[in-house]
Amino acid sequence: MKVLVIGGGGREHALVWKLKQSPRVEKIWCAPGNGGIAEDAECVAIEAGDVAGLMAFAKTNSPDLTVVGPELPLVNGIGDVFGERGWAIVGPSKQAAQLEGSKVFSKEFLQLHHLPTATTYGAFESAKEAYRALKNIKWPVVIKADGLCAGKGVLVAQDFDEARDFIERVMEKNELGTGGKRVLLEEGLDGDELSFIVVTDGRSYAPLVPARDHKRVFDGNQGPNTGGMGAYSTDDLLPEPLRETIVSTIVEPTLKGLAADGIPYQGFLYIGLMLTSSGPKVLEFNCRLGDPETQAIVARMDFDLAEVLEHVAMGNLQPSKLHWRPGASACVVLASGGYPGKFEAGKRIDGLTASERITGVKVLHAGTKRVGGEVVTSGGRVLGVTATGPTLGAALGSAYAAADRIHFEGMHYRRDIGRHPGNSLKATGN
Ligand code: AMP
């Protein structure tokens, strides 16, 4: 098989790394890829959102399978244009990708199918109307810009001033671009967050192993939000009774709802949940895998990913094929100095070879590129040091030992990956 992977971050490196292990795979391209992916695949200089460029590439090179990492190409309709030509692709249609691309679409879907979610106070197309609506709500309120906003479109506001300031920046000053043309106001929910990810061909589905990420930049969940500073996976993150509740009240009704609405969904579906005192409720859908959860999840895959994804693309998923390594995995993200604020790129990275000598460790690249014989930083999140082990402690031990061998100027990382305040989930599930 010749496989095209779209994207250029740590998630895509994890996918490429796993696909390459399949005896079926003879060639992998990655568009645009990065400095680490370049070791495992042929990088192609096409941006992930450039659907026309990707089409032209696929026409010339005829990949047997295309796997889409990020949301942008999906929201731009790559699933449809490949699908119309009969080219095998893992990723939902443009319409289905609206579950992530539009908070309003997603909320309407949740309401139509009576799925558990936060009560909404409405969607507003003018700041004035939104300010007016703030007079009649309970605090805290959650304000969501409707479109894709690179993770900056949601605020949990504690009071009127905070809410007004955010709406002003989003709707009047257009700080988030077109993503902020419309905002949704909804009830603030309380509880632990958990993501539940499934892969589906539109009829069958298979849940992936549970994983959690750490969004804040500093230890103890301090500092600003980031794309994710690390993730981990163990089976006991998700107690069986909780899993059953999530599957019966959320996953299956969601997939049935999509089918009933004539929106066949094929690919990965990431369901962001809040575990409230009245049960799990949907916060958001993403139409793709999470980053860095993917790194932790892929590390535990004990099956042929190329075979499974080919089946997904053909509408023939066999959930029994997904076997998982017992134990745990962890991914520690090494970030550039200053990230998630301003940072400098082009710093030489040392210690990559030494770090991978530790058993069970794979260093997955996110923001790196090759310059001459060297690997240098090129993004905020630079590397995801990923390890497996029989226990979470063992996986973390290996990941941190490997991280300690790596160096670049300004590098920083969290020392408390895997120590989540939400590890009280067991109690919630029971
Ligand atoms: P979203 O992109 O909709 O998942 O929102 C991003 C983050 O905002 C979530 O991961 C939650 O931490 C928070 N959030 C979203 N909706 C709510 C809500 N209704 N109540 C409390 N927190 C929320």
Image (cartoon, rainbow, N blue to C red):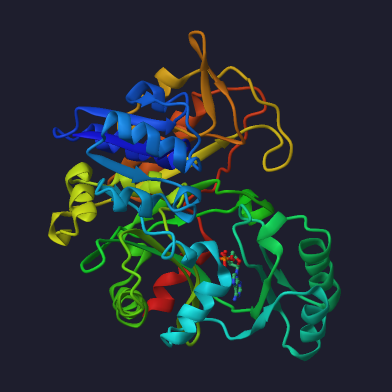
> Is the residue 92 above or below the residue 16 in the image?
below
Horizontal relation, residue 78 to residue 230: left or right: left
Residue 350 at x, y percent in the picture: 52, 17
Residue 256 at x, y percent in the picture: 30, 78
Res. 385 in view: no
Residue at x-position 65% and y-position 22%: 409
Q: Work out which residue is located at the far right of the displayed protein and give it.
A: 161
Res. 283 in view: yes
Residue 338 at x, y percent in the picture: 71, 36
Looking at the figure, which quarter contains the N terminus?
A: top left
Quadrant observed for ligand 1 in the rendered image:
bottom right
Q: Quadrant of residue 253?
A: bottom left
Residue 51 at x, y percent in the picture: 45, 43
Horizontal relation, residue 4 to residue 43: left or right: left
Residue at x-position 40% and y-position 23%: 38
Q: Nearer the viewer, residue 178 or 143?
A: 178
Q: Quadrant of residue 4?
A: top left
Q: Nearer the viewer, residue 153 or 351?
A: 153
User: Total marks drawn?
Assistant: 0
Looking at the figure, which quarter contains the C terminus?
A: bottom left
Q: Work out which residue is located at the far top of the displayed protein and give it.
A: 372
Q: Nearer the viewer, residue 235 or 398?
A: 235
